Amino acid sequence: MNSLINQLICLTSLRRYCSSGLHGLLPWCGALLIVAGCASVPHTGRKQFNVVPDGQINALALKAFSEIVEKEPESTDKKFTTIVRRVAERVSRAAEAVDKPSFNWEVKVIDKDIPNAFCLPGGKIVVFTGLMPYLKNEAGLAAVIAHEVAHAVARHGAERLSQQLAARGAVSVGGEILKKKDGSLDGAAKLFLGALGMGATIGVILPYSRVHEFEADRIGQIYMARAGYDPAEAVQLWSRMAKIQKPPIPVWLSTHPADADRVKKLQEFLPDAQKVYAEAQSKHGLGEPM
């Protein structure tokens, strides 16, 4: 589910809130194109292209979180808010126990009819009340929160930001090469650079976001299982989410996997998560119904 909101905050909003910070990162782009990041994604082992420091992106995320909390109405639904806080605490404790991100966790429930949630870099969780009709129970909520927490722990936001900076650097270098003697760009060069930018988006950034979604599904199932929630409910939750009306868009242009692919992968991941659930110190099953 990120997450449209998670991607929007981690990319679009961070650019808006701190354009000066990004300009400070741009000189690194040449190095980014030569030196690959050394980090690995937990539980999958995939090597990440990520050179944005945690401290920097966490600070940017905190600014975004503060602005959201200031502008958006907080939920007055005490029951739902209590459940969200309980589930978020259990999931964040599980994430810390498993992967030790050492985040400064915080959760807010926003009164808005949006079926979504996100977790910003550094552990700032936001859940919208519009999720309630799809959750059915605490385990469904745990699947959502654990998925979003997994994005943050896996540093997907920083990785995508690194990719965008690298892509921007590639376009900049291409522009220097294609300039005419008077320093301007001719029509053919402009078309080429436009194609290069689109190629970077379709060939790298969008596919990576689908990889991120599958990784967050896999890691999220582990977190919710460690938190004591039945990980099988993640499959049911995403089956329900698949029924949300979405605009038609080809999968190859989408930032998310097709719903059927996501549910299939969750079923494949389930045996590993069930092993974690079997060893959980406290079991809550499906938890309280919504």
Image (cartoon, helix red, strand yellow):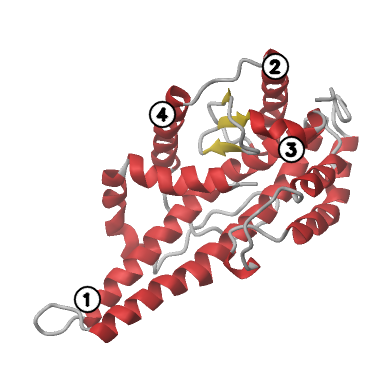
Closer to viewer: mark 2 or mark 1: 2
In depth, the one of 174 and 278 nearer the eye is 174
Q: Earlier in the sequence, mark 1 or mark 4?
A: 4
Task: Determine the CA span between mark 3 and mark 1.
Answer: 47 Å
Q: Secondary structure at mark 3?
A: helix
Quarter in which the C terminus is drawn: top right
Location of residue 116 in the rendering, given as x and y in whole percent from the top left corner: 63, 39
Q: Which residue is mark 3?
A: 223
Give the residue drawn at x 73%, y 20%: 83
Task: Determine the CA span between mark 1 and mark 4.
Answer: 38 Å
Q: Earlier in the sequence, mark 2 or mark 3?
A: 2
Residue 176, numbered label? 1
Give the residue drawn at x 34%, y 39%: 17
Location of residue 82 in the rendering, given as x and y in whole percent from the top left corner: 70, 16
Label 1 sits on what residue type? Glu
Relative side of 142 to 39, left or right: right
Closer to viewer: mark 3 or mark 4: 4
Tell me where residue 165 sits by quadrant.
bottom left
Residue 82, numbered label? 2
Q: Earlier in the sequence, mark 2 or mark 4?
A: 4
Q: Which residue is mark 4?
A: 67
Q: Label 1 neighbourhood size at 10 Å, few (<14), some (14-19), many (20+)? A: few
Give the residue drawn at x 66%, y 33%: 130
Label 3 sits on what residue type? Tyr
- Please tell me whether residue 49 is drawn above or below residue 20 in the rendered image: below
Task: Determine the CA span between mark 3 and mark 4.
Answer: 28 Å
Relative side of 132 to 206, left or right: right
